[in-house]
Amino acid sequence: MRIPGKDIEVIAPNFSRRLSGVTATVAALVPRQARIMGVVATGVGLPEDVPRVPFWRVPFLARRRRVWHARRNNEMLVGFVLRALGVMQLKLVFTSSSPRRRGGLTRWMTQRMDAIVATTPANAEVMPGDPVIIPHGVDTDRFAPGSGTLFTAAEGERLIGCFGRVREMKGTHHFVEAMCRVLPDRPEWSAVIMGRVKPEDEPYAARLRERITAAGLEHRIRFHPEIPVERMPDAYRALSLYVAPSLLEGFGLTPLEALSCGVPVVATDVGAFADFVTEDCGAIVPKDDAGALTEAIRATLARDVGEMGGAGRARVVAEFGLEREAEALCALYRALLAGEGRTLPL
């Protein structure tokens, strides 16, 4: 979807082809923001329905003040270059969900933003300057309950899912261990692990498969490759329980998306998970504790997961809709376009 250059007020770059929380955020937010003002994306890895401008056209847009909203270091750097060369009159915004205090180039660039956005209070504490806190939301129209068809399941089989990069920091090993303990006593349940395995994580993934085989569960704990962001709602809808066993997160969108699809969640106490996973729709457990994760999953399966999913859906619709995030960011953009905020020299 192309937008006339004269109507473009805000550009949201996405310079990664891989599915990630950042890519999912841009893909969800830009279409919603475009209903409010002239917001487009540029870059790669986004669904076709996202309003966009080809990157090669960006430097040739008619000269006027615009906002460049970066979410990665390379995107900040490109914004700096476009402004420093006098090619564009840009107000620079950076959003980060990282829970870690950054150093070096990232901190230097962040300190020179016209506005900084944090997604949680904890995130704001490790960012320089005076960030505004705007929590992530989820598109509750797209991520809605329904019948998922992505995963093939036997009649009567119910699925527990864990999505995201297969690596140690995501706690995938704790999910596998919990499934190896839970599934033998629950013949009607199976599990699916969906996400990319980078070459450096292949030995880790191989160890997970060895553990699954040793437990005799290779037909009930399946691996599925990463899918495009636009297919994610269908993946959640195929589940009856979602598990987020991460050891570290900035915000963490997947539990929020699962809840929006009417799927209860068991998650670790990292990122913003505890803000939206409550007792009526799931459970929060300490990170890096396979035993606690196992017991929470067992307890959840003993409850009415359909009722829990309904409660989670209602909570997300009431408090975490994407519209809130879109409107808050657009208010920030308008303030910058009106001349508020700062423009610092490089």
Image: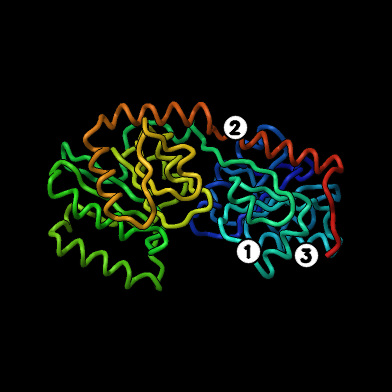
Q: What kind of element bears circle 2?
A: helix
Cα distance between the residues tagged 3 and 1: 21 Å
Circle on res. 81: 3
Which of the 4 quarters of the picture holds residue 331?
top right
Which of the 4 quarters of the picture holds residue 105?
bottom right
Circle on res. 323: 2
Residue 210 vs residue 82, the one in the foreground: 210
Cα distance between the residues tagged 3 and 2: 31 Å
Q: Which is more foreground, mark 3 or mark 1?
A: 1
Residue in view at x 16 percent, y 55 percent: 219
- State which quarter of the image contains the C terminus: bottom right
Q: Which is more foreground, mark 3 or mark 2?
A: 2
Is the Cβ of the residue at disc 3 closer than 8 Å to that at disc 1? no
Q: Which is more foreground, mark 2 or mark 1?
A: 1
Residue in view at x 19 percent, y 48 percent: 182
Q: Local crowd at mark 3 within 10 Å, few (<14), some, or many (≥20)?
A: few
- In the figure, is residue 88 to the left or right of 212? right
Residue in view at x 42 percent, y 38 percent: 277
Which of the 4 quarters of the picture holds residue 55?
bottom right
- In the figure, is residue 3 to the left or right of 224? right
**Amino acid at circle 1:** Arg
**Amino acid at circle 3:** Val
Residue 174 vs residue 114, the one in the foreground: 174
Cα distance between the residues tagged 2 and 1: 29 Å
Q: Is residue 327 depicted above or below 74 in this figure?
A: above
The residue tagged 1 is 102
Residue 330 in the image: state x and y as whole percent.
Answer: 71, 37
Q: Local crowd at mark 1 within 10 Å, few (<14), some, or many (≥20)?
A: some
Residue 207 vs residue 36, the one in the foreground: 207
Q: Local crowd at mark 2 within 10 Å, few (<14), some, or many (≥20)?
A: some
Residue in view at x 31 percent, y 61 percent: 173
